[in-house]
Image: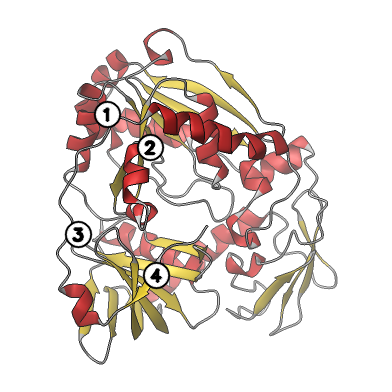
C-alpha cells in the first residue's frame, strides 16, 4: 500500500488551512460488502477460521470491539467476524488521498500518540447516534517483536464514558504470516481468531479503572514467537530472517548497534561476526559463540533494559539526518525537505527546511512513539507532532526506529 505524496515548501505547507472536524459517518452497506469481497482471497489464502464466544448483549452492537494489531490482515479479519455495522478508529494518514472513501467505510481518524480530546465525543456519536459498534486497536501500532505494544493507561475512563460492552478479537498466525520487520514478504501460515467479551456494560460501570487496566493487560499478554514454537507452526520460507536487524539492532556479544543484518535464514553482526541461524519455528541459535538469546522477544526486552540504563546514566542520545514529510490535511503527505532529528531524555527536537522548521516534543508528551518499518513503502519512519501537524521523519541512520520507540516509552515511565 502506498500514500499520495506531494513536494511542497515548508512555508506552503504551514499555510494550508486545517480541515474541519467531521462527525463519524455510518458505514455504507455497499462498501461493507465490497470490503468482505476484497478480503476473501487473502482470508482464503490463510485458511482463515474463527470462533465467536460472545453472547447476550455483548454479541451485537452497539459495542466497543478491541483488537490486537499484527498486520494489515487484521482489518480483513474484522470484516469477516463483525456482523453488525461498525465504525473504525484509524490513523489519520489512512485517509490521505482517499478521505471520502474511508469516511464512507466508517473510519474515524485520529493522530497516533497525540492527545485527541474530540475522539471520545466521536465514539459516543458513533455508538449512540449512528447506532454502530466501534472497532479500535488500542496498541495504536503494529507489534515489532510479536508481543503487545505498550497500552495507554486508564482506558477504563474511556470505557465508562461509552457505557457499552467491551469485546476483544485476538488473532493467531497473523503476525507469523506477515511480521512488520520482514519487508512485507508474506509467509504460508494458517490464521485464526477468537472474539470474547472482556466486560459487559454493567461490569464496565462496576469495575475500577485499575481493575479494567489489569483486564486489558491480561488480554494483551500474548507472545507470538512463543505461540509459533508451542504450536509447531513452521515458517519454511527462506526469507524468514530478512530485516530482523530492524528489531534486533544491538549485538549482545560486542554491544555494537546498527551494524547487523538479517538475510535469508541467518542473522549476523558485522562488527564482531556473531552469526545466528533462525529455524522454522522462529528460534535463534548461534553457530560459534554461546547463544545469548534464542527467543526474539527476550532479545528485544534486553534491548529495552539497555536503553533504560542509558537514559538513567545520561548517555542516551539519538541523532540522525532525516527526510521530512508533513501531514496537515487529508490531501497528501507533503515532503518538505531535509532536517535533523535529535532525541534524548528531554524529548525530541526536529529542525530543518533551511532553518524554518523547529519543533520540540517533551518527554511527557506521550507514553510511546509512532515508529514504523517501510511505512507506505517509503522507508522506516519516526513520527512526532501535535494537533497542528505531524512530522514523518525518514532517518538516514540504519535501524534506529525500534530504539526510538523503546527510549520514548522508558523516558515517559521515568517522568511519570
Q: CA distance from mark 2 to mark 3?
A: 24 Å
Query: Which comes sooner in the sequence, label 3 or label 1?
Result: 1
SS label for mark 4: strand
Task: Kindly report the distance in space between the C-alpha atoms of the residues bearing marks 1 and 2.
Answer: 24 Å
The location of residue 326, given as percent across then percent down, is 30, 70
Q: Is residue 200 above or below residue 366?
A: above
Tell me the element at label 3.
loop
Residue 5 numbered mark, or none: 4
Q: Nearer the viewer, mark 4 or mark 3?
A: 4
Q: How crowded is the residue under tag 3: few (<14 C-alpha within 10 Å), some, or many (20+)? A: few
Measure the C-alpha gap from mark 3 to mark 1: 23 Å
Identify the residue at horizontal 22%, vertical 91% (top origin). 355
Q: Which residue is mark 2?
A: 105
The residue shown at (75%, 35%) is 231
The residue at the far front in this view is 30
Pointer 1 or 4: first along the chain: 4
> Where is 378 relative to 412, above or below?
below
Q: Position of residue 30 (x, y in %)?
A: 43, 29
Q: Nearer the viewer, mark 2 or mark 3?
A: 2
Residue extending farthest to the top is 56
Q: Which residue is mark 1?
A: 159
> Of callouts 2 and 3, which one flags the residue occurring earlier in the amino acid sequence?
2
Q: CA distance from mark 2 to mark 4?
A: 23 Å
Residue in the foreground of this view, choosing between 76 and 263: 76
Q: Secondary structure at mark 2?
A: loop
Q: Which residue is mark 3?
A: 387
Amino acid at each position: 500500500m502506498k500514500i499520495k505524496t506531494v513536494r511542497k515548501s515548508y512555508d506552503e505547507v504551514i499555510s494550508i488551512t486545517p480541515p474541519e472536524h467531521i462527525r463519524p459517518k455510518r458505514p455504507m452497506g455497499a462498501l461493507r460488502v465490497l470490503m468482505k469481497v476484497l478480503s476473501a482471497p487473502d482470508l482464503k489464502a490463510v485458511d482463515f477460521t474463527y470462533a465467536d464466544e460472545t453472547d447476550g448483549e455483548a454479541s451485537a452492537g452497539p459495542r466497543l470491539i478491541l483488537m490486537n494489531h499484527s498486520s494489515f490482515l487484521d482489518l480483513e479479519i474484522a470484516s469477516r467476524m463483525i456482523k453488525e455495522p461498525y465504525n473504525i478508529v484509524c490513523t489519520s494518514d489512512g485517509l490521505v488521498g482517499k478521505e471520502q472513501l474511508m469516511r464512507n467505510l466508517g473510519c474515524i481518524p485520529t493522530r497516533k500518540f497525540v492527545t485527541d480530546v474530540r475522539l471520545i465525543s466521536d465514539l459516543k456519536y458513533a455508538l449512540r447516534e449512528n447506532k454502530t459498534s466501534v472497532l479500535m486497536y488500542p496498541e495504536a501500532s503494529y507489534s515489532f517483536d510479536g508481543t503487545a505494544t505498550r497500552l495507554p493507561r486508564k482506558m477504563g475512563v474511556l470505557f465508562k464514558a461509552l457505557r457499552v460492552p467491551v469485546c476483544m478479537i485476538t488473532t493467531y498466525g497473523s503476525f507469523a504470516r506477515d511480521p512488520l520487520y520482514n519487508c512485507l514478504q508474506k509467509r504460508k501460515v494458517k490464521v485464526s481468531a477468537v472474539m470474547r467479551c472482556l466486560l459487559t456494560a454493567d461490569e464496565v460501570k462496576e469495575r475500577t479503572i485499575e481493575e479494567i487496566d489489569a483486564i486489558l493487560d491480561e488480554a494483551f499478554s500474548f507472545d507470538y514467537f512463543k505461540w509459533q514454537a508451542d504450536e509447531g507452526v513452521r515458517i519454511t520460507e527462506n526469507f524468514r530472517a530478512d530485516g530482523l536487524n530492524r528489531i534486533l539492532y544491538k549485538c549482545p556479544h560486542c554491544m555494537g548497534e546498527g551494524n547487523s543484518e538479517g538475510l535469508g535464514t541467518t542473522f549476523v553482526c558485522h562488527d564482531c561476526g556473531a552469526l545466528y541461524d533462525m529455524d522454522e519455528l522462529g528460534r535463534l541459535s548461534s553457530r560459534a559463540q554461546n547463544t545469548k538469546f534464542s527467543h526474539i522477544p527476550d532479545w528485544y526486552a534486553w534491548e529495552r533494559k539497555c536503553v533504560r540504563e542509558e537514559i538513567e546514566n545520561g548517555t542516551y542520545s539519538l541523532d540522525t539526518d532525516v527526510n521530512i514529510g508533513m501531514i496537515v490535511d487529508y490531501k497528501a503527505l507533503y515532503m518538505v525537505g531535509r532536517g535533523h532529528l535529535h532525541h534524548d531524555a528531554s524529548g525530541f527536537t526536529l529542525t530543518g527546511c533551511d532553518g524554518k522548521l523547529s519543533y520540540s516534543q517533551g518527554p511527557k508528551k506521550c507514553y510511546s512513539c509512532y515508529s514504523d518499518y517501510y511505512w507506505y513503502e517509503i522507508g522506516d519512519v519516526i513520527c512526532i507532532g501535535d494537533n497542528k501537524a505531524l512530522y514523518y521523519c525518514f532517518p538516514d541512520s540504519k535501524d534506529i526506529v525500534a530504539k526510538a520507540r523503546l527510549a520514548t516509552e522508558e523516558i515517559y515511565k521515568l517522568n511519570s
